[in-house]
Image (tube, helix red, strand yellow):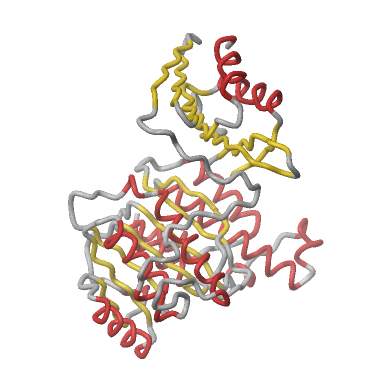
Amino acid sequence: MDEIKLLLEQILNTEFVQGTISNPRSKDDILKIKVRLVEMKGQIFYQCESFTKTQAFHENLNKEDAIKKLIQYLKDFRQMQIITVKDTYTILISKKGKVTIQKKKNKECIKKAPMSHNRAKKYILQEGMQIPFLQDLGVMTAEGKIVKSHFDKFRQINRFLEFIEDILPRLDKTRELTILDFGCGKSYLTFAMYYYLHELKKYDIQVIGLDLKKDVIKHCNELAVKYGYEKLTFLVGDIADYEGVKKVDMVVTLHACNTATDYALAKAIGWDAEVILSVPCCQHELNGQIHAEKLAPVMDYGLLKERFAALVTDGLRAKYLEASGYETQVLEFIDMEHTPKNILLRAVRSGKKNEQAKKEIEECRKFLHAEPTLGMLLSKGE
């Protein structure tokens, strides 16, 4: 690693733009590390942002400590790319530890990003874009300016699109894709999803929004016609008995109340949906079921039991998805309505059923004396 240390000592300076360590030797821990310059209190630091499947961690290090940290990281990775103002370096590390360093002159000098620690976030939907549904929502003016009082909503919509952006490689761009949004409600995020995938990313998609409120569905269809979104349709219907399509590529269910989420997840699994995005809501079912004497310090207090039951419900849902052949993440999502319901389940089909997950579900279920609806629905489909 001496040649890597020497290179880092030479290029970690104010000409440094960014670095990325990728291609891990193991998929069980850190999957990627990004490095950038930050300025705090007049001093320059190197911010290392490491990513696992579900979390991101930040460290701000001086040059000496940054070099040590990056070399330590590289022992478990196969590649690092470093971009400076004038050059791009690619570091390759073989299985036997052989180091290859490639240097390429940039066609033109790269402009460095601001070094402020709290630099402005780059959003998928940016200020200045003419986006009709954001204007009708009151988030954006006719000139494309973000209305300050609605900035939180703007940020939340973008956060949802980031979850979709991460799974784009799993969506087939060579054919029409079918996306179902169960319990779409006012459909702010449905319109955002359609705009992002169809208008910006040029996917051939048909999106179907489903909800029980007739007046809301009528209004959403009127807006879809107004915007010229020909393949965006809204229907009045119940998640539990919807049979309108035979094959679905992505299922979205945001705030489907209580066991409605379970019916939506069961439907998605039955369709072998490639991607599932779910924000559960009002997890009441297990609160009336679970009983475990050893958990009396929690169960004896209604508020604590309710919160515990909600977490157990979503934890079991994630495990049921894993057991059914999905790689599942439990992520934090800031809700449109500013409620505590801020957990998002993101599942991507792997096709490999997880027997260990099945075992964990059964042990947890028996210990708590719980019979989740999702489990019963999936057992009927087997």
Q: Quadrant of the C terminus?
A: bottom left
Q: Residue furthest front?
A: 109
Q: Position of residue 354 (x, y in %)?
A: 45, 41
Q: Quadrant of the N terminus?
A: top right
Q: Residue furthest left?
A: 175
Residue 36 horizontal side relative to residue 264, left or right: right
Q: Residue furthest right?
A: 297
Residue 99 horizontal side relative to residue 44, left or right: left
Residue 216 horizontal side relative to residue 234, left or right: right
The residue under the point 51% across, 40% down is 112
The residue under the point 40% across, 52% down is 165
Residue 10 lies, with reference to residue 96, above or below; the image says: below
Q: Residue furthest bottom?
A: 215
Q: Position of residue 242 (x, y in %)?
A: 30, 73
The residue under the point 28% across, 62% down is 199
Q: Position of residue 118 (x, y in %)?
A: 64, 52
Residue 296 sits in quarter: bottom right
Residue 61 sits in quarter: top right
Residue 27 lies, with reference to residue 130, above or below; the image says: above
The count of marks equals 0
The residue under the point 37% across, 79% down is 211
Residue 39 lies, with reference to residue 204, above or below; the image says: above
29 or 283, which is in the foreground?
A: 29
Q: Position of residue 289 (x, y in %)?
A: 62, 68
